[in-house]
Structures are given as C-alpha cells and as structure tokens.
Amino acid sequence: MPSREEITYFGAGPALLPTEVLKTAAASLVDYNNTGLGLAEHSHRSELATGILNTTKDDLAKYLDVPNDYEILFMQGGGSGEFSATVYNMVNVWVERRKQKILKELGVEESKIPENDLVQQLQKAVDEELKIDYVVTGSWSLKASQEAARLVGAEHVNVVADARKINDVDGVEFPGFPKILEPNGDDSPLVVADMSSNILSRRIPIKNYSLIFFGAQKNLGSTGITVVIIKKNLLPPVVGTPAPTLLRKLGLPIGPIVLSYETIAKNNSLYNTLSIFDVYIAGQVLKSLLATFTDKVDGQQAVADKKAQLIYAALDAHPESFKVVPAKDARSRMNICFRVTHLESVDESEKLFLKGAVEKGLTGLKGHRSVGGIRASNYNSIPLTGAEKLAAFIEEFAKTPK
Ligand SMILES: Cc1ncc(COP(=O)(O)O)c(C=O)c1O
C-alpha cells in the first residue's frame, strides 16, 4: 500500500488536505487543548466554539479581503443545498424590494393599502418580471438551474448561455468578472456565484457580487460546512424576509428555516448545531495559508496559475493524444478536464492513461460519472510538485507506442 507521501490525489472533492492540518485536527478530535474533551464533543455554543468560529471568519475575511459590508455565514447542506437556498433567499429579496417599489410608486405605507390590491400588483410583477438567469458552465450550474426551475417554475428560469455546447468538454472557468454584470445602480441584477471549485485560488472582486458560496471540501477544509459571503444590504435591517402568508398567496416557495440567510446571519451561524470540528479544520487551513502567503490570496493565485500552466502545456504539446477545452482563456485552472485520444478508442486510451497514472501515484483522475473523460482537480492543496508529476506523466504517456 502506498503511503500518503507517495500519492497525489486529484479527486474532485473531497480533496486533499494538508497533512499537518490533519494531524492537528486528529489530536483535537481526542482532546482539544487539554480540555479532556474532543472538539466534536464540545458544545457548539461554548466559548471555545464561538472563538473558533469567529477566528475562522476573520481569517477568511483577511485572506480574501472581504469588505466590511459583507457577512460570512457557515451553512450546512453543501453546494447542492445552496442551489436551493440561493433561490429561496434571492426570490425573497426580489419580492421584498419589488413590494417596496410598488408602495413607493403608490406613495402609501403598507398598512394603508388593502392587502388584496398589493398582492394583485405583486402577482403581476412576479408573473411578468421575475427571472433568474443562469450561465451554465458545467454540470453543476446546470443542476443549479434545474433546481431553480423545480422550485419556482421553469417560466422564471432562463439559461442565458451553456458553455458545454461551445467547448464540447467540461472544465471552464470565468477568466474574470463579466463586465456586463458589474453593479450599476439600484436596479443591477443580484449576482450569485458558486465558487466551490476556485475559491481561495484567485483574487475575487467581491464588491461585484451579491453572494458567493462554496462547499469547504475542495479548497478550504472538510466536507460538512458550506460558506456563504453575502452583501449585508440583502439582509435585515435593509431587506427582511417577506411574510410566509404573502409568499403562499403569490405561489412562491417558502424555504426551510435552516436555509434562511436572515436566520443564519442573526444567529452568527449557530441557529442549530454546526460542526465546529469542520470549522476548525477550515480555520487551520486558513492559518497555514496566511502564514505561507504574506501577500494572501495573490500568492496562492500565482501558484494555482503556475500549476495549471504546467499541466495545460503538457497537454497542448500533444494534440494528437489529448483533447482539451479549445478556448485557452476559458480553461479552468482548477478542474483540468480532457479526453485521451491517443489510441483509436478513447475508452481504451483513457483506461490506459488512468492505469499508468495510478502506477505513478497520481490518483483520482477519473472524470465525473455523468461526464466521463479525465479530470485533474488541481485544488489548492495539490503541491506544485504534484502538478509537475502529472505534467511529466502526460508527456511520457503521449510517447506510449500505439
Ligand atoms: C462547482 C460545484 N458546485 C456544487 C457542488 C455540489 O456540492 P455538494 O456535493 O457539497 O452538494 C460541486 C461538487 O462537486 C461542485 O463542484
């Protein structure tokens, strides 16, 4: 059996965690800081748990330069849970803001207008104006759009682009923030991003987003917590959640309370039992990142870019053996997806590639079951040497006699 040091694991999530972090976390699981209790046994409402939570929040804010007008929430339910949560919460924000606009146009307070009149006007607005646009860049954003259609009806959901139809393989990433979505006054769209794959790997213009979410298990920590960075003006006191009775009348879904950003924010992420152990692991990863990169996420970005360049350069050098996303500026630096076309049969080529890779200690390269092909998830904890090993193997494989 290979040792941990001999393996570079390119799995798509859960992903590798730094060994030192795991060792510290393992010890804390048995006895946290000589308290005689393991961290997973301590109350999530204890002082030490709150300390871990707040320090992790602060370190994340520091590392990413999260502006003060954003709140950081630790949620449960994974990225998939956020596909639902973003719909419930953003539709709520839309309804509440639209209601305020109607009242302003009428020049009356809510208590002065017959309820039915308000509901009628809001219903018309919902029917005619409520649209959630999705830019589909891969199977996850497709799933997100499908969840939105399931919750609010397909008539309110619009897939504005589908990158998979253009590039023919998965594995794309926005090279930067789309200019057209930059905030421009009160009527700007609410921009939401799933950054599960690339968080902490590049500087993000957070100010351009209403909300960013990501599962911790790829770039931050272990499975079990999902982070939401939300603009405070989407929360009370600026925007409250519409009354359930109103949502029911409008035929809109009422989300579970545990997915309500307002509720989670009000309780500093402790509305219900949160896995403080998972928050601790994320906190340890952040501590180590802050110690390694004095220029914070910019330093990590330089490494992430270099790793991706190495692997793509090896693939591009052998177009007869590998098929990669053709548009170079749209290629994901984090999920490097490709097909192996070395032999006549792609299937046989990929089997051979995976077998050879495992022999070199390069594991987890098989693509997602619904997509196929090869996927090297080049997340933050893959060291530069891991990317170098993969690039060398790609070169070597291309020379395999046919
Ligand atoms: C980009 C992205 N979003 C969402 C998900 C779903 O996350 P979860 O399994 O935590 O629900 C994944 C899972 O791999 C993902 O890669």
Image: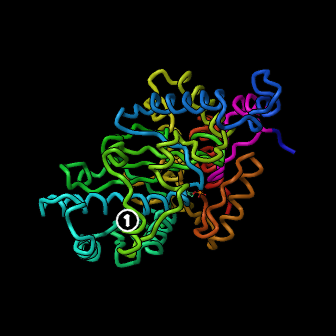
Amino acid of disc 1: Tyr
Which of the two residues, 254 or 199, is positioned nearer the viewer here? 254
Tell me what residue is drawn at x 60 percent, y 46 percent: 225
Which of the two residues, 305 or 261, is positioned nearer the viewer here? 261
Residue 253 sits in quarter = bottom left
The residue tagged 1 is: 134
Q: How far from the left and from the top, in percent, is residue 141?
A: 46, 63
Which of the two residues, 174 or 147, is positioned nearer the viewer here? 147
Q: Is residue 159 visible from the viewing direction of this image?
A: yes
Which of the two residues, 199 or 190, is positioned nearer the viewer here? 190
Q: Is residue 21 magenta?
A: yes
Tell me what residue is drawn at x 64 percent, y 35 percent: 45
Residue 153 sits in quarter = bottom left
Give SS at disc 1: strand
242 is higher (above) or lower (below) than 313? below
Tell me what residue is drawn at x 42 percent, y 39 percent: 71
Q: Dot 1, crowdedness within 10 Å: few (<14), some or many (≥20)?
A: many
The total number of labels drawn is 1
Q: Is residue 301 magenta?
A: no
User: Is 43 positioned to the left or the right of 82 in the image?
Assistant: right
Residue 137 sits in quarter = bottom left
Q: Residue furthest right?
A: 1
Q: How far from the left and from the top, in percent, is residue 194?
A: 46, 53
User: Is 247 positioned to the left or the right of 196 in the image?
Assistant: left
Q: Is residue 337 visible from the viewing direction of this image?
A: no
Magenta extent: 4-26
396 is higher (above) or lower (below) than 348? above
User: Is 162 positioned to the left or the right of 293 in the image?
Assistant: left
Q: How far from the left and from the top, in percent, is residue 263?
A: 49, 49
